[in-house]
């Protein structure tokens, strides 16, 4: 086993899939010679050529439309939206075409495409380049939504997404690109719709998504010094959602904190909280469910304000300490 970064793991999965299947190709802005906005596809055009690593004009709608059309004709496109904020320009192709064609054609057409897109804050990119909009696509029937937090999960889940015959939205947090973990050299897949317990604990279940998984792990170390043991559940995929793993964990601990970066109002944190409150785990709760999520403001540019706009390690620590103080 070797340790590589999240960005390297994504690149490795893309390259392995393209070597294995000539129907797989990539398209998006600056993904060729430039290597992508975050360097994920660096070096791939030299191996696969410009026919399969297609740098496109700046038109997210055209990129998504080309991906949908090529998927319908038997290709397996992977298209990149350079920043997840600009999914707004491609929503008609994604929501009204990709998500619905297989259903409306009675299963006679398949849409095996993957949308890769970096999202989230932490890079000082301000309000138009720092949003967490994964809940938008999670709301649409017909789309699968993946949000891996680690390099290991990113590689395995990306392989699963590419092999899936349905449209898959694959969200990569910008700050995760620099994180590292042990990743096998060989190809492997992680089933879509299976959560992972990143840390076993006994006192509180912390359900965290994306970069918040790393913040929850950091909080766990601090809480350990305070004799508080948290169990960290990473859904990994928002759609389909592994509800049972969350339910089982809460039934064990009796307390729950949900942590997401996206804005709290109408965000996915509410969906996760409802999984708990509408299941048998509700009867095991010893305290109300706590939701930590983004502030209801456009993302600030100033780094101090940016940090205040989304949950941080100290917020998770404070919420968990308060839950235990109230027992």
Image: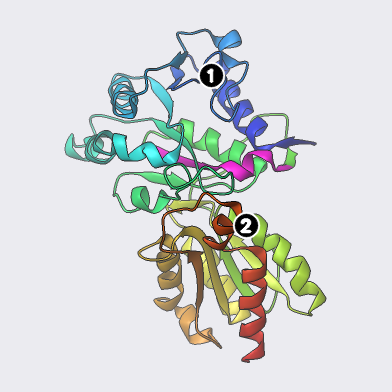
SS state under label 2: helix
The span picked out in magenta is: 168-180
Most foreground residue, 323 or 240? 323
Residue drawn at point x = 66 percent, y = 42 percent: 152
Residue at the far bottom in the pictured view: 327
The location of residue 132, given as percent across then percent down, is 45, 50
Identify the colour scheme used: rainbow
The location of residue 107, given as percent across then percent down, is 24, 35
Residue drawn at point x = 67 percent, y = 73 percent: 317
Is residue 202 visible in this depiction of the protein? yes
Q: Is residue 211 magenta?
A: no
The location of residue 248, given as percent across then percent down, is 56, 72
Q: Which residue is mark 2?
A: 213
Residue at the far front in the pictured view: 302
The location of residue 65, given as percent across then percent down, is 28, 26
Q: CA distance from mark 2 to mark 1?
A: 30 Å
Please state if 212 lies on the left or on the right of 70 as rendered: right
**Residue 9, image quadrant:** top right
> Which image quarter is the C terminus in?
bottom right
The disc at residue 18 is 1
Of pointers 2 and 1, the one earlier in the residue sequence: 1
């Amino acid at each position: 086993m070797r340790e590589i970064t999240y960005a390297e793991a994504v690149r490795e999965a893309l390259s392995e899939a393209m070597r294995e299947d000539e129907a797989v190709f990539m398209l998006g802005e600056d993904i060729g010679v430039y290597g992508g906005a975050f360097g994920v596809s660096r070096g791939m055009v030299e191996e696969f050529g410009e026919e399969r690593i297609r740098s496109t004009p700046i038109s997210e709608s055209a990129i998504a439309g080309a991906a949908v059309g090529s998927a319908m004709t038997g290709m397996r496109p992977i298209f990149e939206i350079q920043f997840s904020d600009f999914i707004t320009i491609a929503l008609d192709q994604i929501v009204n075409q990709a998500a619905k064609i297989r259903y409306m054609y009675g299963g006679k057409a398949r849409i095996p495409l993957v949308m890769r897109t970096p999202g989230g804050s932490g890079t000082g990119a301000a309000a138009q380049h720092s949003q967490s909009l994964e809940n938008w696509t999670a709301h649409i029937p017909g789309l699968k939504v993946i949000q891996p937090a680690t390099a290991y999960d990113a590689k395995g889940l990306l392989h699963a997404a590419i092999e899936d015959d349905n449209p898959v939205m694959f969200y990569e947090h910008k700050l995760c690109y620099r994180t590292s973990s042990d990743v096998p050299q060989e190809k492997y897949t992680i089933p879509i719709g299976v959560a992972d317990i990143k840390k076993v604990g006994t006192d509180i279940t912390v359900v965290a998504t994306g970069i918040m998984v790393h913040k929850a792990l950091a909080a766990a170390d601090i809480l350990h010094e305070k004799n508080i043991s948290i169990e960290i559940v990473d859904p990994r995929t928002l759609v389909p959602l592994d509800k049972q793993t969350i339910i089982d964990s809460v039934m064990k601990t009796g307390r729950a904190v949900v942590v997401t970066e996206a804005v709290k109002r109408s965000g996915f944190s509410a969906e996760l909280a409802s999984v708990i409150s509408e299941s048998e785990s509700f009867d095991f709760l010893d305290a109300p469910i706590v939701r930590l999520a983004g502030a209801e403001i456009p993302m600030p540019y100033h780094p101090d304000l940016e940090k205040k706009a989304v949950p941080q390690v100290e917020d998770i620590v404070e919420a968990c300490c308060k839950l235990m103080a109230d027992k």
